[in-house]
Image (cartoon, coloured by chain):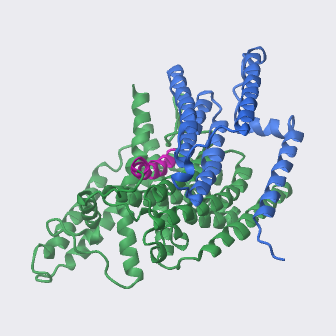
Amino acid sequence: METYLFYIFSFITVWTVILMILQKNPIASATCLVISFFSLAALFALLNAHFVAVLQILVYAGAIMVLFIFVIMLLNLKKSELMHEKMSRLSFFAIIIGLGLFSFLMMKFFLIPQIFFGEISPSFGTAQEVGQSMFTQYAIPFELIGILLLVGIIGAVLLGRKDTD
Amino acid sequence: MPETLITILKIIIPFAIIFTFVPLLVWLERKGSAYIQDRPGPNRAAVLGIRLGGLIHPIADVVKLIFKEDICPSQANKAYYIAAPFIALSVACVTFMVIPFAAPYTRDGHIFTFQAAQLNVGVLYILAMTSLSVYGIMLAGWSSNNKYALLGGLRSSAQMVSYELAMGLALIPLIMWSGSLRLNDIVTLQTAQVWRWNFIYEPLACIIFIIAAFAETNRTPFDLPEGESELVAGYHVEYSSLKFAMFFMAEYVNMVIASALIVTLFFGGWQIPFLPTEVLRENAQMILNIVLTVSALLAIIIGFFLILKFKKRTYGDKRDYEVIVLGIPAVLAGFTLILFLLFFGKIPLSTTAELWITAILQIGTFLFKTLFMCWVFIWVRWTVPRTRYDQLMNLGWKILLPLAMVNIVITAVRMLLK
C-alpha cells in the first residue's frame, strides 16, 4: 500500500513540476507548483515525518505561494507580454549553471546510501526532535539563518518604503 | 473490519455535524439579524403549514439554489473557475478532522479517540489548512475575469496572509503551557475547572486569536473581500447556482471550524464545567437520569406553552394548527420519557454504556459551546460596522502582531517564575 502511494505521489510531484515549467500562464505554473508541494508533503508523511509534511504545506503552500500568486495577480499580465523570449547569451549561462547544480545533486544522491540506511529512531521527524537538534547541535547555523532572514526583511522594507524626504 | 468501519464513521460523522450546522447557522444568522434590527425575520416558508419559526427557510434556499441557472462567464478561465468553489469548500471541511469531540477512553489495552485523525502536530495542521483556504477565494477572484472579483481576491489574500501571523503567534503561549501540539492534550490540560481554562490563563492570546479568526473567516468587521458597498460581492460576483452555494457553505463551514477551534483552545473543548471525566463516568447513571428528566420537563413546558398559543383564524389556513401539531407530540413525548424513567431508571448500566454516555454528554457540551461561539460571530456581524482597508492592515501588523510577540515573552517569564 505504502509503496503504491509512494509511486503515485512521486509521479504527481515530478509531473506537476514539469508542467510548472512548461505552462505559459503564470498562474497555472504557480498552481502546479502548489500541487507538487502537496504531493511532496504526502511523501514526507509517508516517511513518518509529519512535522516536516505540515511545515511544507504551512510555509510553502500556505504562505510563500500565496504571495507569489498575489504578485502575479497584481501584475495581471496580458497575453502578448507572456510570449517566449528568444535564446540569449543569458539563457546559455543559465543552462550551464543548471547542469552544474544537477550534477552536484546527482553526486550527493549517489553518496546518500553510505550515510543513511540505518535504523531510524521512532522520534525521528517529530517536533520535539527537530526543536532539540535546532537549538543544540545546529544552534549556530540556525541563528545565522535567522540573521540572513532579518537582513532580507530589512532590505524589503527599505525597498518598499515611500521616500519621505 | 470493525477497525475500518470505525475509521470510516469517524470521517463521516464530523462531516455530518458540519453540514447540519450550516443550515442551522443560516437560519440563526437570518433570525438573529432580524431580532437585532427589530423585525420578525424569515417566517413564510412552510411545509403543510409547519414553519418551525423559519427553520424551513434553509430548505427553500437550497431548492432555489439548485434550480438557478449555472452561468460561466465567456471570458473566464473555465478550469479554475470550476475548481475554485470545490477548493474553498473541501479545504474548509478537512480542518475539522483533528478536533477532539470527547475524552478518549482506554478499553482492553487500546485507546479509542473521538477525533478522525490523532495527529502529533494537530495545531500546526490546523494552521496549515486555514492558510490554504485563501486559494479558493483567490482563484475564484482571478478566474472570473472581473475587476471587482479580482480586487476581492487580492484583498482576501493580503488580509489572510497578514492575520495568519498573529493567529499563529497567539497560539504559541498555549503550546508553551501544554508542551504538546496535540489538541487533545491541550483540552485535557485545561481540566474541568473553569478558572483553569486558557481564556483565563491567556486572555490576551484569546482576544488576538478571536480577532484573527474573524479576519481569517472573512466575517464582518473584516469582510472586505466581499464588501458589497464597494466591490458588489467581491470574489464571488460571477458565481451563481450551486457554485455560489458552495462558497456560501464554505463561509459557514469556516465559521463553524473557527468556533470549534476557539472552544477547543481557549474554552475547555469537550470539558463539562466542574464535571471531570472520571466523575462523569462514575455517576453516569445519575447524570443521565437528571438530563433526561430535565429534557422531559422542558418538552412538557414548551408543549403546553405552544398549545396555549393556539387561536383559530389568525391566518385562516393550516398554519393555525402548527402550534398544536408541534405542542401535543412534545407533551406526549415528555410524559412518555418520565414514565420510562420511572420504570427503567433504576436498571444499572454496563461499563460500555457509562463510557458512551460520558462521551455523548461531552460531545453535546462541545457542540453547544461551538454553537454559542458561532452565535458570537453572528452577533458581532450585525453589531459592528466594516473596517476600512488601511485600518485592517494597521490592526493586523502594528497592533496584533507585536502584542502576540509580547505575550510570548510574558508567558515565558510567567513560566520561569512559576
A4 or B406, which is in the foreground?
Answer: A4
Which range is magenta? B78-97
**Among the 4 quarters of the image, the one containing residue A139:** top right
Q: Look at the image and say whether residue A133 sits in the magenta stretch.
A: no
Instruction: Please name the predominant secondary structure of the magenta segment in the image.
Output: helix
Q: Position of residue B80 (x, y in %)?
A: 44, 49
Residue at the bottom extreme, as displayed: B38
Compare residues B13 and A135 and report the one nearer the observer. Answer: A135
What's the colour of chain B in the image?
green
The image shows residue B205 at horizontal and vertical percentages of 68, 63
Q: Quadrant of the N terminus of chain B?
A: top left
* B294 to B119, vertically: above or below: below
Q: Colour of chain A?
A: blue
Tell me the residue at 51%/65% (across/down).
Answer: B152
Q: With respect to residue B40, does B414 lie above or below? A: above
Q: Is residue B300 left or right of residue A122?
A: left
Residue B84 colored in magenta in the image: yes
Q: Give the farthest residue toward the right.
A: A140
Q: Quadrant of the C terminus of chain B?
A: bottom right
